[in-house]
Amino acid sequence: MVYCALNNNKNKSMAKKNTEFYVDNVKFTQALIDYGYKVRAAKEAGEDIPRANNYIGHCILRICTGVSMRHNFINYSYRDVMVSDAVHNCVKATIKFDPDAATRSGKPNAHGYFTQIAYFAMVRTIKDHAKIQDDMISYIQNSGIENFISSDDMESQKEVIAFINELRKGTSDFESEKKERSSEHYGWSKPVPKDD
């Protein structure tokens, strides 16, 4: 009786396989191995490298979209850019997939290989966007943009200057919060050295 209850729970968990982003690792790996043979044959014959088939492309798209749904990527407004960068990196890496690479299970793991590539591509995209945002903030803070305002109406000129000053204040507040967050470590404040 207990065995049947445990067995039924096992079947329920196996039914979750057919989700939107599920990729069968065995079929995906075999498709990449077959593609690798075609690439090697084309290189030996001096021909152009053949395109990967649609199945490989769909699997890569599912993996990248699934990785973008992780808790650390889902709330970014440019998640579609992260997915496209990840897909681009994965497509470039299809040629480099090595089925003989060592894995913990001893079997080739294409899903793990492309998941890792997608993850790090998304991290790079976030870092690139953070750098662009920092550049924009520093531009707002350091620019003498009010010198370029050409308006005969003093009232509108004052409104524009007030808006620019508000932007500068907001960016300086953001920078101070950013520095304050970086001084904390896992919720604990770092000890401040005493000046003697």
Image (cartoon, rainbow, N blue to C red):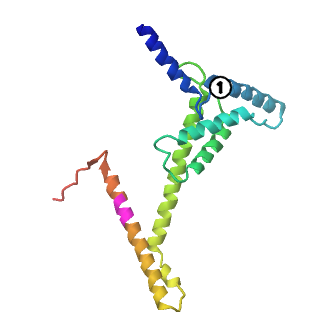
Of 176 and 152, the residue lying toward us: 152
Q: Is residue 143 left or right of residue 176?
A: right
- In this orientation, which residue lies closer to the viewer: 175 or 68? 68
Question: Which residue is under mark 1?
Answer: 29
Find residue 181 and report its horizontal and vertical position in percent: 34, 54
Write down the region rendered in magenta.
173-177
In the displayed structure, 16 sits above or below 148; it is: above
Of the residues shown, which amino acid type is indicated by label 1? Thr
Residue 54 seen: yes
Q: Residue furthest left?
A: 196
Most distant residue in the top direction: 1
Percent across and percent down for residue 136 are 50, 66
Numbered disc total: 1
166 versus 174 height, above or below: below
Tell me the element at label 1. Answer: helix
Quadrant where the N terminus lies? Answer: top left
Q: Nearer the viewer, residue 175 or 9?
A: 9
Image quadrant in which the C terminus is located: bottom left
Q: Residue at x 56, y 38 (%)?
A: 66
